[in-house]
Amino acid sequence: MKKLFLLTTVIIFMIVAFTACSDLTPQERQARATIKTRFKQSPDGDSYKPMAWGRVVVNASYAGTGTKNVIFGETGTPPSPYSMTHRLRMRNGFGMEVTFDIRVFFTDESCRQWAGMEYMANDDPNRHLMQE
């Protein structure tokens, strides 16, 4: 009986996991791969842990608006309208693991090239749309 329960649990988990991944577009799969590769190559890449993902969005209002944020400077401009939100845990400069909510920008719709990122504000509604 225990074996049957365990087998059923594993099968249900695999179906849910496959279904969750299969609803991603090829563009979103590529965006995730680009983000993972970039963070894994960073100085503290061994501590990188993805936690949640948004969808790839095309938001023309982000390109060229002069959005104020810590990555692009006081009047910096996100370099592209193609972006994906992402929550991650990583070691900071003091060696502590911290959680970041970021928006990653890509150079074009292929999402193969990282163009920049910004930290997401606490009141940004996209922070709550990320898939755990």
Image (cartoon, rainbow, N blue to C red):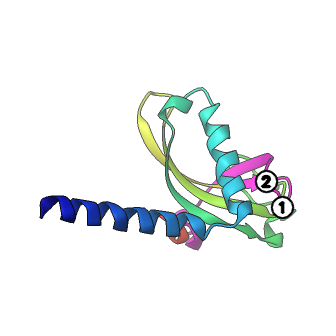
Task: Characterize the local packing of mark 2: few (<14), some (14-19) or many (20 or more) Cα atoms within 10 angstroms.
Answer: many
Which element type, helix, strand or loop, lies under badge 1? loop
Q: Nearer the viewer, residue 106 or 120?
A: 106
**Is residue 92 something one can see in this rendering?**
yes
Residue that numbered label 1 is attached to: 109
Direction from residue 10 to residue 78 in the image, left or right: right
Percent of width and height locating residue 121: 58, 61
Direction from residue 8 to residue 36 in the image, left or right: right
Label 2 amino acid?
Answer: Phe
Judge whether residue 63 is colored magenta.
Answer: no
Percent of width and height locating residue 49: 48, 43
User: Circles 2 and 1: CB distance less than 8 Å?
Assistant: yes
Task: Characterize the local packing of mark 1: few (<14), some (14-19) or many (20 or more) Cα atoms within 10 angstroms.
Answer: some
Q: Nearer the viewer, residue 18 or 7?
A: 7
Q: Residue at x 83, y 65 (%)?
A: 65
Label 1 amino acid?
Answer: Glu
Q: Which residues are magenta?
A: 104-127
Direction from residue 1 to residue 86 in the image, left or right: right
Q: Residue at x 84, y 63 (%)?
A: 63
Q: Residue at x 48, y 33 (%)?
A: 47
Which label sits on residue 106?
2
